[in-house]
């Protein structure tokens, strides 16, 4: 089964996860090394499908179209948005339990001072098609 692990942050977490530009170079290197090691382990186990970090929310745009005129594009940042998606993994693993293990591991990525960030990781199964009852 495929799962998506979504790494999300919120304004309320600023004290827990301060912006990377406030981290020391060694703290940033340790965080990036953890992510690289996680991806390497997932590849070795045959569970890796994809993983990407995303640009900061101030680069985001919301695009809406109703099919009649040109789309409306709203540039970020979006002050009404309290949470933002920082990155994701798509993994292919044997069970829900394994997906939870992977999400828990990612949640422990090191932050400032090497302490685990305890990041909230949203875990969602990737649908392979519409529900059978449709």
Image (cartoon, grey):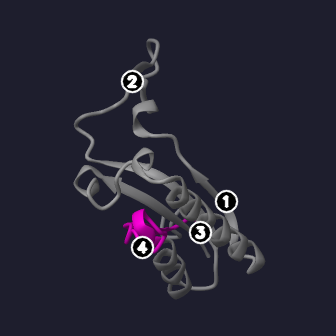
> In front of the other: label 2 or label 3?
3
Question: Crowding at label 1, few (<14), some or many (≥20) Cα neighbours within 10 Å?
Answer: some
- Callout 4 secondary element: loop
How many residues crowd around disc 2 within 10 Å: few (fewer than 14), some, or many (20 or more)? few
Q: Residue furthest toward the top?
A: 69
**Could you give the CA–CA distance between mark 3 and mark 1, rounded to whole angstroms?**
16 Å
Return the residue at label 4: 116
Considering only order in the chain, which callout, 1 or 4, is on the residue closer to the N terminus? 1
Measuring 64% from the left and 79% from the top, which residue is drawn there? 93
Crowd tier of the residue under label 3, counting other residues whose Cα lies within 10 Å: few below 14, some 14–19, many 20 or above: some
Tell me the residue that label 3 is attached to: 34
Residue that numbered label 2 is attached to: 75
Q: Is residue 90 above or below residue 11?
A: below
Along the polypeptide, which appears first: circle 4 or circle 3?
3
Say which residue appears at 74% left-offset and 72% top-offset.
Answer: 43
User: Viewer-nearest of labels 3 and 1?
Assistant: 3
Give the mark, 2 or 3, whose residue is nearer the N terminus: 3
Residue 117 sits inside the magenta stretch:
yes
Q: CA distance from mark 4 to mark 2?
A: 33 Å
- Spatial separation of the CA atoms under disc 1 and disc 2: 27 Å
Q: CA distance from mark 2 to mark 3?
A: 32 Å
């Amino acid at each position: 089964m495929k799962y998506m692990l979504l790494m999300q942050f919120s304004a309320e977490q600023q004290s827990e996860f301060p912006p990377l530009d406030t981290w020391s170079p060694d703290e940033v290197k340790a965080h990036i090394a953890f992510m690289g090691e996680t991806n390497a382990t997932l590849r070795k186990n045959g569970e890796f499908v994809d993983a990407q970090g995303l640009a900061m929310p101030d680069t985001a745009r919301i695009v809406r179209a109703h099919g009649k005129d040109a789309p409306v594009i709203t540039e970020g940042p979006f002050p009404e948005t309290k949470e933002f998606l920082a990155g994701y993994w798509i993994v292919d693993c044997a069970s829900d339990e394994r997906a939870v293990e992977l999400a828990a591991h990612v949640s422990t990525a090191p932050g400032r001072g090497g302490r685990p960030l305890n990041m909230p990781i949203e875990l969602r199964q990737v649908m392979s098609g519409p529900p059978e009852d449709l």
